[in-house]
Image: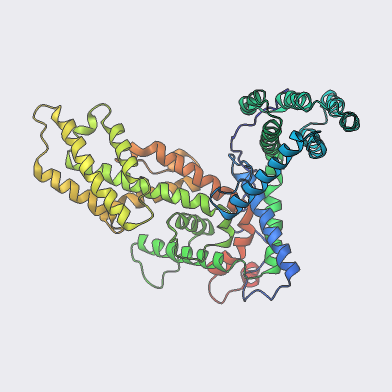
């Protein structure tokens, strides 16, 4: 019976996120450099980090899958691996083609095949296990070898039948292809290749089956593992503390700017939640040249970098939509299919332009030409809907000018998008979220997708690391000279 396949649905972690200032039993803001560690302690730390990263990836990434290890063919490892494998199978071919044939290596392979098939059986597969023991009775096979009666092709056929009954549906075509192989060595080689894939399928099936249970334990597990790292290396939160401090300074400046009479002596303090939310959004704009990435976010860095790239493209795309709508007075936007076609053009030409400034400049130049052409074609279908040359040149120039990070249109759209993301993190009623005015309303599906993915990362991270952030935030928020004891005693 084929093994069922698990879906890649992403589960939400249990909602036990910390309060605005959660308590912490034994943590304090770290200071100083890590002590000199022995080789054994370093290896223990490496294993701890590796286990923590793997567990985190399994829990937060609904699409997590292990893949069979296959070194690049043009690498040294790949060439050596290929040479060793080729030598092994060539040696087996020589043994089987000798007169009389030698089956010593073939018998060892059959024993390994039996072991691999056995590892794919579940406890409930009693009949299949009995069938496997009978079909690959190693004692009987040895007797057949001694009497020159071993039918290797028949045994391989039995193995393929067993594989067909155990494999996931995705492997059915590869198993069927094995039945067409007549040459014994190629057949055995194909069996091993597909069995390795089936083993990986079984591991992934097990991971997906256990994910709901792992999710329940993930928060405590990750906290405990990170505490273990922190115990060995007290400086493992230094970058995190600096990250929160920078966010606190930005949030305090934003609060002062909102007051009627802002001043350097303003005593308005931001909340811990506001600081955390601003800190999280700063990660979407992180300078790749800055090595001081917060330690508590390292396991999600690749995901956040990807979301940052999406944000970059979304802000530029919305900026282009705003400039285009303003320049053609929104006439073209009322035409059926215009906005969809324009969004596709923007996405295609801006793809991959985030890495280098030169790539962005070139992409925006091409985009300006493409947008002007589409607007001309759209207006051409309207009576008297010409696009003056002066307007064309101006739109091209405005779009090409978006490469500057301080471009006023790009800045305005960026602030609106950040406001939406902050409102998403705050949660609550949808009425509390800022209304998506033009042009953000045109990219609302992309914006909602970005906000959902970002919110899931933030929610899980704060649930796990809230107790580690708490003492850092207390030191940032408590007035100078006051102690926690003094505050509590009032």
Q: Tell me the quarter of the picture where residue 92 sits.
A: top right
Say whether residue 203 is visible. Answer: yes
Q: Where's the N terminus, which quadrant?
A: top right
* Residue 38, percent from left and from top: 73, 72
- Which residue occupies 62% across, 41% down? 65
Of residues 175 and 266, which is closer to you in this image?
175
Of residues 41 and 211, which is closer to you in this image?
41
Say whether residue 20 is visible. Answer: no
Residue 86 position (above or below residue 135): below
Residue 109 position (above or below residue 248): above
- Which residue occupies 54% across, 62% down? 294
- Which residue occupies 53% across, 71% down? 479
Q: Horizontal placement of 267 versus 339: left or right?
A: right
Of residues 138 and 374, which is closer to you in this image?
138
Q: Horizontal placement of 486 versus 135: left or right?
A: left
* Residue 282, percent from left and from top: 45, 58
Q: Where's the C terminus, which quadrant?
A: bottom right
Residue 448 position (above or below residue 182): below
* Residue 300, percent from left and from top: 55, 52
């Amino acid at each position: 019976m084929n093994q069922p396949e698990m879906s890649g649905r992403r589960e939400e972690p249990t909602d036990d996120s910390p309060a605005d200032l959660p308590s912490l039993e034994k943590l304090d803001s770290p200071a100083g450099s890590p002590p000199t560690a022995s080789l054994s302690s370093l290896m223990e730390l490496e294993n701890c980090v590796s286990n923590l990263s793997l567990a985190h990836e399994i829990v937060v990434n609904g699409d997590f899958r292990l893949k069979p290890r296959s070194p690049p063919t043009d690498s040294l490892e790949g060439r050596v691996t290929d040479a060793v494998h080729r030598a092994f199978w060539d040696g087996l071919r020589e043994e089987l083609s000798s007169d009389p044939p030698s089956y010593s290596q073939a018998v060892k392979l059959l024993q390994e095949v039996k072991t691999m098939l056995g590892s794919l059986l579940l406890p409930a597969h009693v009949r299949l296990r009995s069938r496997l023991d009978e079909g690959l009775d190693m004692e009987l096979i040895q007797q057949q070898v001694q009497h020159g009666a071993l039918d290797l092709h028949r045994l391989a056929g039995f193995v393929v039948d067993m594989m067909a009954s155990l494999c996931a549906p995705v492997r059915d075509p590869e198993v069927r292809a094995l039945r067409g192989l007549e040459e014994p060595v190629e057949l055995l080689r194909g069996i091993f290749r597909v069995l390795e894939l089936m083993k990986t399928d079984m591991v992934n099936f097990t991971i997906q089956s256990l994910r709901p249970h792992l999710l329940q334990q993930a928060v405590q597990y990750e906290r405990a593992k990170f505490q273990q790292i922190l115990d060995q290396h007290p400086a493992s939160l230094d970058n995190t503390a600096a990250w929160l401090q920078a966010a606190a300074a930005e949030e305090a400046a934003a609060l002062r700017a909102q007051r009627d009479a802002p001043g350097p002596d303003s005593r308005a303090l931001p909340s811990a939640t506001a600081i955390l939310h601003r800190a999280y959004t700063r990660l979407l704009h992180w300078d790749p040249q800055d090595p001081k990435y917060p330690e508590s976010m390292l396991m999600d860095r690749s995901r956040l970098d990807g979301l940052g790239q999406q944000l970059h493209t979304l802000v530029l795309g919305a900026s282009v939509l705003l400039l285009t709508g303003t320049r053609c007075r929104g006439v073209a936007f009322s035409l059926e299919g215009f906005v969809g076609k324009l969004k596709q053009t923007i996405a295609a030409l801006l793809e991959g332009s985030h890495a280098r400034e030169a790539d962005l400049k070139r992409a925006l130049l091409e985009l300006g030409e493409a947008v002007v052409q589409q607007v001309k074609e759209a207006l051409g279908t309207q009576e008297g809907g010409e696009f003056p040359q002066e307007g064309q040149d101006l739109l091209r120039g405005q779009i090409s000018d978006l490469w500057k990070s301080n471009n006023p249109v790009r800045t305005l759209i960026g602030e609106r998008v950040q406001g939406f993301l902050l409102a998403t993190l705050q949660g609550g009623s949808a009425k509390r979220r800022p209304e998506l005015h033009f042009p953000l309303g045109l990219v609302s599906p992309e914006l909602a997708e970005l906000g959902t993915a970002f919110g899931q990362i933030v929610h899980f991270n704060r649930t796990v690391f809230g107790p580690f952030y708490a003492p850092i935030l207390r030191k940032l928020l408590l007035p100078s000279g006051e102690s926690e004891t003094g505050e509590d005693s009032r």
